[in-house]
Amino acid sequence: MSNNNGLSGPNLNVRIICPDCKTFPPDLIERFSEGDIVCGSCGLVLSDRIVDTRSEWRTFSNDDQNGDDPSRVGDAGNPLFDTEDLSTAISFSPEAGRTGRDLNRAQSKSLVDKKDNALAAAYAKISQMCDGYQLPKIVQDGAKEVYKLVYDEKSLRGKSQESIMAASVFIGCRKANMSRNFGEISALTSIKAEDIGKMVKIVSKIVQHKVNSDPHSNFYLEEAANNSQTSLTDLIRRICSSLGLNNKVTIAAEYIAQRCKEEDILTGRSPNTIAGAGIYMATLVYQAGTPIQSICIKSAIGQGTLKVAYKIIKAEQDKLTDPNWFVHDDSV
């Protein structure tokens, strides 16, 4: 649109007036109950189907005046629950009498509410487990989504719920590319690492079957090989951080572990063993003075396992270390 000055754009001088009575200034009334705009002078309907843009906040009683959320629209729906948080909870008090007690009993028999209450308790436990390692919200959401998918499976009936939660957290970490090993997940629960590994296989098969049968599922299960086990680099960084080692030792340990992979040294051993051996050699290089017992504890391996692995990489020291490093010639 062009105006008299040759400039393009809307003409802000245009005013809406009633075409019937042409009263100026116009007396327009918005009637949100009918969705109309009418002229206050003659009653002509000027527009219909308008959207009510007023605030949705409303207080129902005096009890809500001190609350933080007196909105009449309620909370946003949560897809992790069947009722999307729209169910009604009836509490019981002695003053309510028999009627209140009967209503409370009828409400407690609702199967949907029982399921949601059980899911809410499980989600709280999963959040607590994730907070133990300060895992981000994306891991918590992924773990809760996995748990929701397998909650009603008949093959998991009678299984330990804590082991299912631990497996869900493990898969949630893998989904977010923040893998943790079974030992680290086991430290957050009372479940053994071997049992968590078995449960992860069962849960992964169930989730994969559901994802394949439902192409519109919002859950995706990573199948990449680099996600099937804990990243060695991330594992070394976490262990070095727990031991309080400086950045030079961490970089050296990562270099040694990478060279072990390239030279096919320590093939077949667990990532914890390779990480522990690389960290121990790096501490000797820079004379960090870290006790071998501390490295074994943080790596979740035995001293005998670490000593055997270190002797193997010690024999290949020239291939695994940088020539500019000063290697402390110490023996286990």
Image: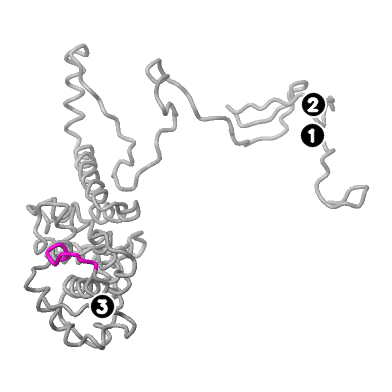
Q: Amino acid at mark 2?
A: Pro
Quadrant of residue 24 within the rendered picture: top right
Q: Amino acid at mark 1?
A: Ile
Question: What residue sits right under mark 1 in the picture?
Answer: 16
CA–CA distance between discs 2 and 3?
79 Å
Q: Residue beneath label 3, please? A: 257
Q: Secondary structure at mark 3?
A: helix
Crowding around mark 3 (Cα neighbors within 10 Å: few <14, some 14 to 19, many 20+) is: many
Q: Is residue 187 left or right of residue 65?
A: left
Q: Where, by quadrant of the figure, is residue 195 drawn? A: bottom left
Q: Quadrant of the C terminus?
A: bottom left
Q: Are marks 1 and 2 in contact (CB under 8 Å)?
A: yes
Q: Which mark is residue 26?
A: 2
- Please name the amino acid that badge 3 sits on: Ala
Front-most of 66 and 245? 245
Q: Which of the marked residues, 1 or 3, is nearer the chain's N terminus?
A: 1
Of the numbered discs 2 and 3, the one sitting upstream in the chain is: 2
Q: Could you tell me residue 204's position as x and y percent?
A: 21, 65
Q: Position of residue 22 (x, y in %)?
A: 84, 27
Residue shown at 36% from the left, 61% from the top: 216
Q: Residues within 10 Å of mark 2 (few under 14, many from 20)?
A: some
Give the secondary structure at mark 1. Answer: loop
Marks 1 and 2, how far apart at CA: 7 Å
Camera-side residue of 295 and 31: 295
Magenta residues (range): 288-295
Residue drawn where x is 28% and y is 79% of the image: 326
Q: Is residue 289 magenta?
A: yes
